[in-house]
Amino acid sequence: MHMKVRDVMTSEVASVNGSTPFRDVAEVLIAHEVSAVPVVDGEGHVVGVVSEADLLRKEEFREQFYREGYRPPLRARLREAMGHGAARSQARARGVTAAELMSAPPVTTRPYTSVVSAARQMSQHGVKRLPVVDDDGVLVGIISRHDLLKVLARADADIAREVREDIIGNCLWADLSGVEVSVSEGVVTLTGALERRSQARVLTRMVERTNGVIGVVDRLEWKEDDVGPWEEA
């Protein structure tokens, strides 16, 4: 019922190795129109991620390390003066290769992870994309926020088909043959009759968890109200 990362990820991924020079990393980002690329070792294992922010951090402290008369923004100077990540920022300012500039260890995900879990990872770590690796840590794809939006923007017909076939059609815990489904702008409307109110509640919650569903309008009827007052919420 839930889409996996493998269903929406991009399989052809631009990557660099640890010895890739600063300028070449920048050219890869520009050529592929991405904001970050995975850094891989000789066997394809992901060892880090280098982003636009990592490259720009080098410029942030250019005056201190290259004496070119460049003065970092006030925010950057205050952050360094207060010691918030100063050592790390200074080390990256000296960096000239992907290995020296990258963020590590990398935040990665697996092909069989649900897109919901991938979205939570992105939010938790404040990143816009995740390298996808197999169980050996080898790069097999990448998933971005844009890929996640594709799931939310699923066509109404696709949502209706999934609800009818995967939820109603495969149901073994209740007779759902009398349930009808319609979808408009991601909102699913359920109509029909069931034996018990508890069955209607379970069905509604299952539909709510379907990828791309924005909301559920419950117009189901039931013969027996087997939901106690303590279960109303």
Image (cartoon, rainbow, N blue to C red):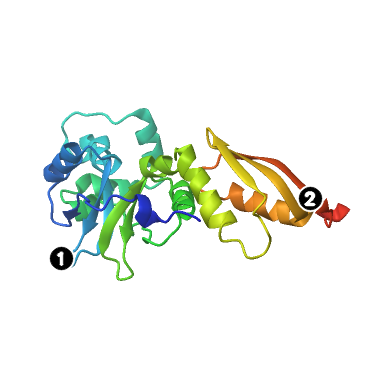
| Amino acid type indicated by mark 1 | Gly
Mark 1: which secondary structure? loop
Q: Quadrant of residue 18?
A: bottom left
Q: Residue at x 39, y 42 (%)?
A: 145
Q: Residue at x 47, y 40 (%)?
A: 157
For label 1, count other residues whose C-alpha is less than 10 Å away and answer few (under 14), some (14-19) or many (20+): few
Pinpoint residue 23: horizontal percent, then vertical percent.
12, 42
Q: Are marks 2 and 1 in contact (CB under 8 Å)?
A: no
| Amino acid type indicated by mark 2 | Trp
Question: According to the image, label 1 marks what residue?
Answer: 42
Q: Residue at x 33, y 29 (%)?
A: 73
Q: Report whether residue 82 is seen.
A: no
Q: Report whether residue 72 is seen.
A: yes
Q: How many marks?
A: 2
For marks 2 and 1, give the CA distance: 62 Å
Q: From this view, report whether residue 139 is shown above or below residue 164.
A: below
- Compared across the picture, whether 34 is left or right of 192 comes to left
Comparing 84 with 199, the one in front is 199
Pinpoint residue 179: horizontal percent, then vertical percent.
65, 48
Comparing 72 with 183, the one in front is 183
Pinpoint residue 39: horizontal percent, then vertical percent.
22, 55
Q: From this view, report whether residue 42 is shown above or below residue 141.
A: below
Comparing 65 with 1, the one in front is 1
For label 2, count other residues whose C-alpha is less than 10 Å away and answer few (under 14), some (14-19) or many (20+): some
* Residue 222 numbered tag: 2
